[in-house]
Image (cartoon, coloured by chain):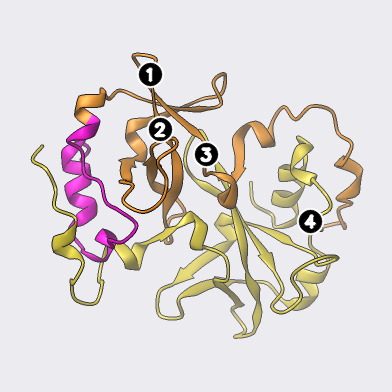
Chain colours: A orange, B yellow
Amino acid sequence: MAGVSTTETTNAPIPINETERLIASDKVGGTAVNNRQGGRLGEVYNFMVDKLTGQVAYAVMGFDGFLGIGERYHPLPWKTLAYDTRLGGFVIDLTRDQLERAPSYTLEETPWAGPKYGRSVHDYYDIP
Amino acid sequence: MAGVSTTETTNAPIPINETERLIASDKVGGTAVNNRQGGRLGEVYNFMVDKLTGQVAYAVMGFDGFLGIGERYHPLPWKTLAYDTRLGGFVIDLTRDQLERAPSYTLEETPWAGPKYGRSVHDYYDIP
């Protein structure tokens, strides 16, 4: 329970543990999302986090270069994603065609207010 | 796999499920942190999220009204926190005295770069 000096680690060598694993919630935006075919699908806009368990339920993905009004955001269930530390981004087994038919919304919409929206997203990706 | 209409839920009644459970990662800031004695300790500044598991590892707390230069931020292991849906905030079993001796850092410091920082935080709170 001794006091912890936080300054002693400021000049630490290249991070090999915590920062490989941890990302600040206000810095998740922009993380790449690729598919297993090697294509870039987009980038993370934000995470939807379960307040009771602390588990990220969805990574919401936007398309590169089309952020803003009219842009469609795709919620991807966490279980569909794998974080690739080498790429520094997420990988998902999803073609562009499958993505285009997937649930999405604009920033003018508030789909999460509906209790069944999360269920419909999970159903699309065949996640129990 | 049918297309999902996101507009049909826009005028949904008071959210009872998803929004009770989910919060966007860019909206976690400001969530209250109280202690079990009923006092308000501060508010969430951000979450530190494990990129591999999607589990929030720490809620980083700042003090109300003292954000900014010189302000100290306290990382609280997720396991020390309970989300109280009635209060709309987190509750932790921690006195102000214990908080004052707890690990903290300023925004000018980058303690997470050190591989042992997370361990030291967990040790302070007696979390395995």
Segment colored magenta: A99-128
Q: Nearer the viewer, residue A67 or B7?
A: A67
Q: Nearer the viewer, residue A41 or B61?
A: A41
Q: CA distance from mark 2 to mark 4?
A: 30 Å
User: What kind of element bears circle 4?
Assistant: loop
Q: Quick one: label 4, few (<14), some, or many (20+) residues within 10 Å?
A: few
Q: Mark 4 highlights which residue?
A: B107
Specify the subunit that label 2 lies on: A
Specify the subunit that label 4 lies on: B
Question: On the same chain: label 4 and label 1?
Answer: no
Q: Mark 3 highlights which residue?
A: A30
Which amino acid type is shown beneath numbered disc 4? Leu
Horizontally, residue A91 falls left or right of residue B119, namely left
Specify the subunit that label 1 lies on: A
Q: Mark 1 highlights which residue?
A: A39
Q: CA distance from mark 1 to mark 3?
A: 16 Å
Quarter of the rendering occupied by the C terminus of chain A: top left
Measured as percent of width and height from the top left, residue B39 is found at: 64, 85
Q: Nearer the viewer, residue B50 or B10?
A: B10
Mark 4 or mark 1, whichever is nearer to me: 1
Specify the subunit that label 3 lies on: A
Measured as percent of width and height from the top left, residue B22 is found at: 37, 60
Q: Mark 2 highlights which residue?
A: A42
